[in-house]
Image (cartoon, helix red, strand yellow):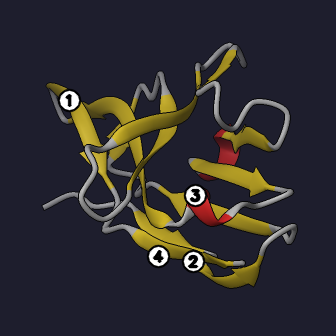
Amino acid sequence: QVQLVESGGGLVQAGGSLRLSCAAPGSITSINAMGWHRQAPGKQRELVAVITSGGITNYAASVKGRFTISRDNAKNTVYLQMNSLKPEDTAVYYCYVSGRVNTVSGTYWGQGTQVTVSS
């Protein structure tokens, strides 16, 4: 099973920063979009940020101006820099990529990393 490897989550005080990383295995090729979702307890999973292969980005309104998504295509890695964190940012963060494994196109996910922001 193809899985992305996430790192960088943790506990931080409100106003602090964290940087999440997500590395996709080399078996995933023709990667187009890379991004992050999050799911807070009792809530639906929501899109946080996405970046296309051409570098076009899109953010949820709730994180715009505070979070920055970037990618390193040579490393098949996507990053999420999170600044000015708020308690409502507390969630499990999941990265994903849209790409191809052998001849099969699909969306591949990380295992999730916990981000907890204390007030």
Location of residue 76 with respect to 15 vertically, above or below: above
Number of other residues with Cα within 10 Å of mark 2, as a class: few under 14, some 14 to 19, many 20 or more: many
The residue to which callout 2 is attached is 116
- In the image, what residue type sits under mark 4? Gln
Query: 27 or 96, which is in the foreground?
Result: 96
Residue 11 x, y percent position in the rendering: 64, 86
Dot 2 falls on a residue whose secondary structure is: strand
Query: In which quadrant of the rendered view does residue 12 lie?
Result: bottom right
- Name the kind of residue labelled 1 in the image: Gly
Answer few, some or many: residues within 10 Å of disc 3's Cα (few below 14, many 20 plus, some between 14 and 19).
few
Find numbered disc 1 in the image and state the secondary structure of the residue it sits on. Answer: strand
Q: Give how far apart the Cα atoms at labels 4 and 3 are.
A: 13 Å
In contact (CB < 8 Å): disc 4 and disc 3: no
Question: Which dot, 4 or 3, sits closer to the camera?
Answer: 3
Q: Residue at x 65, y 64 (%)?
A: 20
* Residue that carries the numbered disc 4 in the rendered image: 114
Which residue is labeled 1 in the image?
106
Foreground of the two, 51 or 74 = 51
Q: Find disc 3 in the rendering and name its residue.
A: 88
Residue 28 sits above or below residue 90 on the image: above
Q: Secondary structure at mark 3?
A: helix
Report if the CB atoms under discs 2 and 4 are less than 8 Å apart.
yes
Instruction: Identify the residue at horizontal 71%, vertical 39% (top origin).
Output: 69
- Quadrant where the N terminus sits is bottom left
Q: Give the amino acid at mark 3.
A: Glu
Q: Residues within 10 Å of mark 4 (few under 14, many from 20)?
A: some
